[in-house]
Image: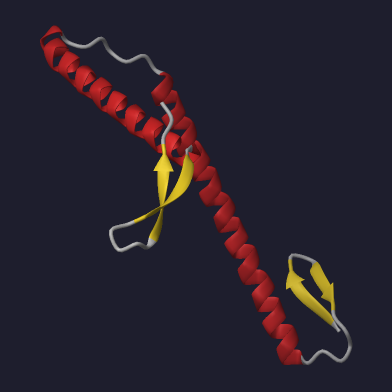
């Protein structure tokens, strides 16, 4: 059996394929082709948007206005303080993760794992 897909395209199917199966297969192929074309268009549109965003990001930013300088300095200081705090916490977590552990009985005598931090 030969399945005609249009535009001069044909698909050779086994002779024992039913007409209904061939019709369903043909519809499925055409629907999937349409979806693939739509997906390619969407991908091209998204790529174009990404390219536009990249061009916008690469453009130089205008210099800050003098009135904004005190607020910017306060913001920068707050961010630096937060960064320092996070760095200390991450360092403590790393030290605790890499530290030795010992078994210590709790107040009920049940052994519990405790971290032994080095200096």
Total marks in image: 0
Q: Is residue 107 above or below residue 51?
A: below
Across and down, in percent, residue 68 comes to 14, 14
Along the line of sight, the residue nearer the viewer: 43 or 101: 101
**Which of these two is toward me, 36 or 99?**
99
Residue depicted at x 15% and y 17%:
74
User: Which percent across, then down, holds residue 70?
Assistant: 12, 12
The residue shown at (70%, 84%) is: 23
Classify residue 83 by image quadrant: top left
31 lies above or below 19 = above
In the rendered view, would you say 53 is above or below 63?
below
Q: Which residue, as the protein is rendered here, is positioned at the far front?
A: 109
Residue placed furthest toward the right: 15
On the image, the x and y values in percent for residue 4 come to: 77, 75
In the rendering, at what x and y percent does residue 35 appear? 58, 63
Residue at the spot 32% in from the left edge and 57% down from the top edge? 106
Residue drawn at 86 percent across, 84 percent down = 1
> Left of 5 or right of it: where is 43?
left
* Quadrant of the rendering where the C terminus is positioned: top left
> Along the line of sight, which residue is nearer the eye, 15 or 10?
15
Question: Which residue appears farthest toward the top when viewing the image?
Answer: 66
Left or right: where does residue 12 sit relative to residue 68? right
């Amino acid at each position: 059996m030969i399945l005609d897909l249009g535009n001069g395209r044909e698909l050779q199917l086994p002779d024992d394929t039913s007409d209904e199966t061939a019709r369903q297969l043909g519809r499925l192929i055409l629907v999937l082709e349409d979806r693939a074309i739509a997906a390619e268009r969407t991908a091209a549109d998204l790529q174009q948007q990404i390219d536009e965003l990249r061009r916008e990001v690469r453009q130089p930013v205008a210099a800050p206005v003098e009135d904004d300088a005190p607020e910017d300095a306060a913001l920068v200081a707050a961010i630096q303080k937060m960064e320092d705090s996070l760095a200390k916490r991450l360092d403590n977590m790393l030290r605790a993760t890499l530290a030795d552990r010992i078994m210590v009985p709790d107040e009920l005598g049940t052994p519990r794992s405790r971290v032994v931090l080095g200096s």
